[in-house]
Image (cartoon, rainbow, N blue to C red):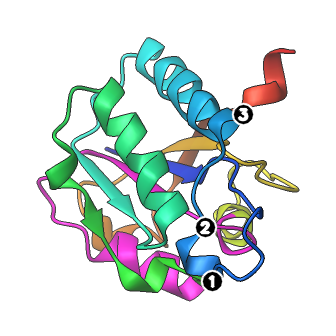
Amino acid sequence: MKTLLLIRHAKSSWSEARQPDFERTLTEGGKSDARMMALRVKEKSLKITLFVSSPAKRARKTAKIFMEEFGERKENLLTIPSLYQASVKDFYRVVENLEQKEETVAIFAHNPGITDFINSLECSPVYNMPTCAVFALKIKTTDWKEMEVADKEFLFFDYPKSRD
């Protein structure tokens, strides 16, 4: 069995109008939400073996905050360019190319692709992934390459304002 966590980046800033989308950084609230969500995931006793991110600054920063909370060295973050503006097909390709030794993987990416990918999994619909939302599922296989055809089991869906 494999476990996959799909995490949308935390709230990012639009304060600098000339700043390219790729370079947008997190707001202070976004950083706080990322810490809170990392702790909520940690409470579930999941041992993340690999952190994977879009190379966009806001996704990388969200991933690094999670890594810090999990005691993982930030240098161990794997960035995959196709996760920026990813299609459903891009997500499948990324997951299916993960190393078999990885048991629990967290992927940090963006809307609308992350929501579309989750809904393609057909294990629990999500109409929108809010910023810093976490969607987790078990994949009933020992081989990531079988991800698309393997049975999937919904574990949880959580986001910063879900407990307000």
Which of the two labelled residues, at mark 2 and mark 3, occupies the earlier sequence position? Answer: 2
Q: Quadrant of the C terminus?
A: top right
Horizontally, residue 5 falls left or right of residue 102, namely right
Q: Are marks 1 and 2 in contact (CB under 8 Å)?
A: yes
Name the amino acid type tagged 2. Arg
- At horizontal 72% and vertical 33% (from top left) the residue drawn is 159
Q: Tell me the residue at 63%/47% (across/down).
A: 10
Task: Measuring from the top left, give residue 49's x and y in whole percent.
Answer: 21, 42
Task: Look at 29% across and 37% down and name the residue there.
Answer: 48
Mark number displayed over residue 24: 2
Please tell me whether residue 56 is drawn above or below residue 35 in the rendered image. Answer: below
Q: Is residue 102 visible?
A: no
Residue 48 lies, with reference to residue 120, above or below; the image says: above
Q: Residue 159's mark? A: 3
Taking 117 as reference, is 34 left or right?
left
Residue at 45% over, 62% down? 150
* Residue 20: image tag: 1
Name the residue nearer the viewer: 110 or 60: 60
Pinpoint residue 80: horizontal percent, then vertical percent. Answer: 34, 77
Q: Which residues are magenta?
A: 87-114
The answer to whether residue 12 is magenta is no
Q: Is residue 90 magenta?
A: yes
In screen coordinates, is 56 left or right of 103? right
Q: Quadrant of residue 93?
A: bottom left
